[in-house]
Image: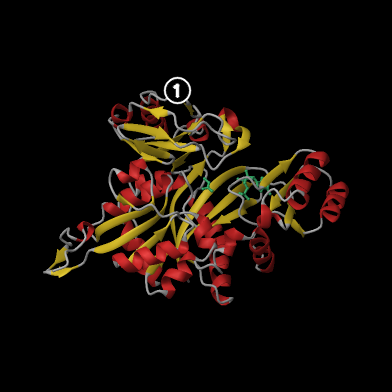
Amino acid sequence: MIQDPPSLTKAAPTVYGVEIGMKILVVGSGGREHALCWAIAASPLCDKLYCAPGNAGIAAETECVPIAAGDIDAIVDFCRKQAIEFVVVGPEAPLVAGLVDRLEGAGIMAFGPTQAAAALEGSKGFMKDLCAKHNIPTARYHRFRDAEKAKAHVRVHGAPIVVKADGLAAGKGVTVARSVAEACAAIDSCLTERRFGAAGEEVLLEEVLTGEECSFHCLVDGEFALPLATAQDHKAVLDGERGPNTGGMGAYSPAGIMTPELERRVMDEIISPTVAAMARDGMPFRGVLYAGLMITDSGPKLLEYNVRFGDPECQVLLMRLMSDLLPALLAAHDGVLKTFYLRWFPETALCVVMAAKGYPGESVKGSEIKGLDRAGAVDGVTIFHAGTKREGEKLLAEGGRVLGVTALGDNVAEAQARAYRAVDLVDWPQGFCRRDIGWRAVARGGE
Ligand code: AMP
Ligand code: GLY
């Protein structure tokens, strides 16, 4: 008799004797995917959870398989062999490369947009044209493929001006240029020197919007959008929003700037018209739609769309989610979100990202991290791993963003104090973090 592989031997959860447990795969390896695994593993609907490729923190709780998030053939193959029933895709690159289309084509349910719908993040030109067509408030823009024409536009319109690569550039494709020279250098780097390869075949030049930024996430089922809790991240690498932009050095939820009235405007003026337009154009959007917003004096404006959870916004959102995440993801997949209601803990969640020194540039690799047991034992604290790996007994930093020290508190000051108490117990001299995550909420008097 052929024995089941060990991964399939755990008894599946049952209701009245009927098996309800699902075999699930999460794709990705960051803090966002650790939080997704943490939430999905807690669901009574989850029988067996895998993560590809995961990280050391995920591996402590979930079975990790050494398949890169971009290796679509290997992921589909693994899902077929292990009879995976539902795949949750974390990062944008495999979505833009068509992972969900391939999985669904193979009869495997997958959470996330199709390749066509993922163009909302994969092509800023596509996103801006959609906004222009449907009067969705966003910065004025022009698209260029020719460097000389783009630079001529900058010389006429002057600085400051925003220069963006059209495609995915791992958070490095945007320059808010303070001078004409800086804008021209960014244009050359993209169109002439091809710094971003094919992702930089086109640039967008945008008017600079001023105000406060906010992250607004919705679950979308093709027609209906269900807003999640509000969050705000900190993109700049240094305290006081100084230094180059990163993927995110910290986040907190709720974000007090997003009042119910503003939330209604964002839904009516930005999210709903986008979801309707995508459906009408034959590319219904399913998955997480994350709008990066600028709250300007004249109201909310769309900076960018992301087609997945933000990282580290996901960590703070899921810490606050009281409801089971998995049925919500399935409802978005199945087109039945309208019947859904999500409950949230009223507490504030705050995440401090610890990165390896040098990030967002070339960062130190292979340094040892100690003290996580003590840090993780601080009241209300959960530590999500991003760039970590195990080598024997040692926990090593792989570089980039490494840990997301996340805390719940009755208000932002308490969540912040707990997160930094835990950060201070992490023994990792080669790491650093910002010391002011949540400062806007603290300045507003606590949220
Ligand atoms: P994006 O990837 O398009 O969100 O851009 C990354 C960051 O660049 C945003 O979070 C903003 O801080 C900044 N940014 C992008 N577009 C604009 C704009 N039109 N005006 C001002 N800042 C912008
Ligand atoms: N924290 C920003 C992002 O995930 O794009």
Residue 54 as seen in the image, left or right of residue 135? left
Please state which of residues 308 and 12 is positioned toward the viewer in this rendering: 12
Tell me if mark 1 has few (under 14), some (14-19) or many (20+) residues whose alpha carbon lies within 10 angstroms of its own. few
Q: Residue at x 41, y 37 (%)?
A: 404
Res 46 seen here: yes
SS under mark 1: loop
Horizontal and vertical percent for residue 402? Answer: 44, 37
Q: Which residue is mark 1?
A: 429
Direction front: furthest residue:
1
The figure's colour scheme reads secondary structure
Residue 192 as seen in the image, left or right of residue 229? right
Q: Amino acid at mark 1?
A: Pro
Q: Residue at x 67, y 46 (%)?
A: 174
Quarter of the figure with the C terminus: top left
Residue 181 as seen in the image, left or right of residue 37? right
Direction left: furthest residue:
17
Residue 52 sits above or below residue 75 on the image? above
Horizontal and vertical percent for residue 75? Answer: 41, 62
Residue 1 as seen in the image, left or right of residue 184? left
Q: In which quadrant of the rendered view does residue 83 lie?
A: bottom left
Quarter of the figure with the N terminus: bottom left
Horizontal and vertical percent for residue 292? Answer: 57, 51
Q: In which quadrant of the rendered view does residue 67 lie?
A: bottom left
